[in-house]
Amino acid sequence: MERRSPLATTSVMGEWRKSAHGAATALGTTDGRWALVSTSLTAMIAGSIAWLAIGTMPPMKPHGLAAHSQTTFLPYQLFQKLTHSDGNYASIAPFTPPKPTSPLDQAADDQTLDSGDATSGIDTRTVTMDRGDTLAGALEDAGISSEDASAAVAALGKVYNVRSLRAGQDFEVTYSTAPQTADANENAQALVPATGDEDDANANGPVGPATIAPAAHLISIAFSPSIEHEITIARDESNAFAASDIVKKLQVHEHRAGATIEGSLYLSAMRAGVPADVVVEMIHMFSYEVDFQRDIRPGDTFEVFYSYYYTPEGQPARNGNIAYATMHLKGRSVTLYRYQPDPNQPADYFDAHGQSAKSMLMKTPVDGARISSGFGMRFHPVLGYSRMHKGIDFAVPVGTPVMAAGAGVVQIAGHMGGYGNYLRINHQNGYGTAYGHLSRLAPGIRAGSHVHQGQIVAYSGNTGLSTGPHLHYEILVNGSQVNPLGVKVAHGRVMQGRELREFQMARLHTDALMAAMPLETKVADISTDLRQAKVK
């Protein structure tokens, strides 16, 4: 070993004396002593934390490690307690594992993140009923507790028939997402193993969920079953649910509209701003006197005087009554007034002479129908030879509602050979009507059922010997088929005496009201015209 020279040793000793003298000088001051103590404590704490952190790391398994070797590590919970300090030098906040959330909680968390409000525990979302679902089931599926859902539905039943709820109904549900209690967190953490090898699925035994998802606390429910009603279910002072139904006071407005028919009455009336439900009622009014397939031509005109109801905000709610309607066809005019002779009977439509517009049978049992095949001999497209066609065919899509042409009793309702699904109704004075190739019968229609004129009794289809969707319609007189377009049927009653005089006074009053109103003929702007009603 090389010996240091006396000169080198003397030089090193001189440098040490200078360093020691400098250290002594620094420790001779208060600031110097505190700096030394602070640096030493910081180094000790940093070393302790590093040692504890290494103890919590999962074991590393090199390829050469024996299978029976084991390593024991410091539990993470103990690491948290040891590193939590109330001093001024270091403190690590205890870790709270994330908890799973219910669907409503998750929606609330998402909205809170979007809004930046981390303290809000109340949120609102839309819940929609599915087909075959109930309100209570929809609420539970959304995360509401079964107790809250049942209590809310029970409160609703006091102001509204819950059986009237249908699929597609929306509900605005307000709820709170309170955090879990400490006991719940402790119970949930007990399911999480504190030690063991995470690479060995059998080392820790079965592992359950970290927490139990809490049900959201229901605050209120709001929905509108119709445009006139707003229903709210909310908690009262006693924390029980109570329901309230706010009924909007509708305002009635009268309109006088008319236009030239181009194409069809329905489309022409819609272009003039007449609501769809008013147009359908007007078609029913004239269905006894007008054949919409053969009688209407381009250039004919119509006029209608009707009332309509609106919400206080001006939104159309429902149609009122048609007081007057007229159609000017080539060669003739048909004018009808609404009048109610008997307060105990529904109102009816009469012409200017007091004769009811209703006849025993309607000419057209379906709306908007086009005659595709008439009465008489024809070549049958399925059988391949000519034979008598004992009715008329209306080309309509499958599922089009079919109305009873007159009041009567159902004689046959079911499948009948080439007719497919078939319906026959017996009327008065030996008259009858039959409907073939139906897709299905209306609910409640069976042999022996009583039906009224205009009632929906079936739906058109393509069953039996049929090459396409249509309705086969027959009129029978004493059991034999006759041409529906040429049959003469009895008209409704005619008012006389005092009843007729009262009708004439009511008719003149209606004429005076119409004369004082402008005729609306412009094409309606669907986005702004308050008279545009929703198609039902």
Image (cartoon, rainbow, N blue to C red):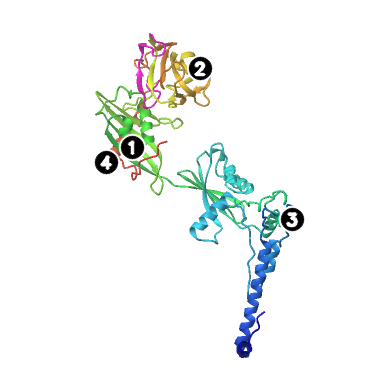
- Residue contact between numbered discs 2 and 1, judged by CB atoms under 8 Å: no
Q: Residue at x 33, y 44 (%)?
A: 529
The residue under label 2 is which amino acid type? His
The residue under label 1 is which amino acid type? Val
Mark 2 to mark 3 CA distance (whole Å): 82 Å
Mark 2 to mark 1 CA distance (whole Å): 40 Å
Disc nearer the start of the sequence (2/1): 1
**Residue 103 in the image: x percent, y percent?**
57, 49
**Residue ID for mark 2:** 415
Looking at this view, name the residue that lies furthest to the right: 68
- Residue contact between numbered discs 1 and 4, judged by CB atoms under 8 Å: no
Mark 2 vs mark 4: in front: 2
- Residue contact between numbered discs 3 and 4, judged by CB atoms under 8 Å: no
The residue under label 3 is which amino acid type? Ser
Highlighted range, magenta: 361-385
The residue under label 4 is which amino acid type? Pro
**Residue ID for mark 3:** 69
